[in-house]
Image (cartoon, grey):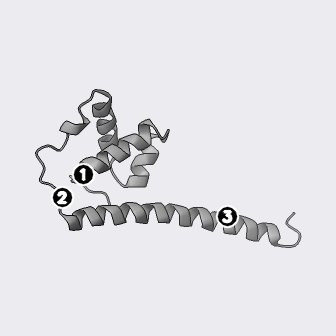
Amino acid sequence: MDRKSHGCYSKEFRAEAVELVVEGGVSAYEASRRLCLPKSTLENWVRAFKTGKLAEIGGQQRPLTEVEQELERVKRELAQIKQERDILKKAAAYFAKESLPGTR
């Protein structure tokens, strides 16, 4: 997956990413992989959240347009669907192997 080198992330996206780590119990590495963003960026957001400064991050950035917001949403959805597909592939392979005669 391609990663942005200096990405623009909305405040909502940052808040959701931090929530995934802080309240969701997901590691920073796993969350950054799922969301296709650098682990260090997510760790910085979590640190800022814990000090109460998450809202200050990205204050100098321009607001995202509707098209950019839609693109961001679609990318998140695609990443989730790819993860679900990979799980289903592994499950299908497991059950196909189990159904072969002589493999039990």
Of marks 1 and 3, the one in the foreground: 1
**Quarter residue 103 falls in:** bottom right
Give the CA separation, mark 3 to mark 2: 39 Å
Where residue 65 sits in the image (x, y, percent)? 17, 63
The reply to whether callout 2 and callout 1 are in contact (CB within 8 Å) is yes
Using residue 15 as the reference point, say whether residue 25 is left or right of it: right
Where residue 48 sits in the image (x, y, percent)? 27, 32
Mark 3 residue type: Ala
Q: Quadrant of the N terminus?
A: bottom left
Q: Which mark is residue 56?
A: none
| SS category of the residue bearing label 3 | helix
Q: Which residue is mark 2?
A: 64
Q: Which mark is residue 91?
A: 3
Q: Which mark is residue 10?
A: 1
Mark 1 residue type: Ser
Using residue 74 as the reference point, say whether residue 89 is left or right of it: right
Q: Quadrant of the C terminus?
A: bottom right
| Residue in the image at 42% along x and 52% along y | 33
Give the CA separation, mark 1 to mark 3: 35 Å
| SS category of the residue bearing label 1 | loop
Give the CA separation, mark 2 to mark 1: 7 Å
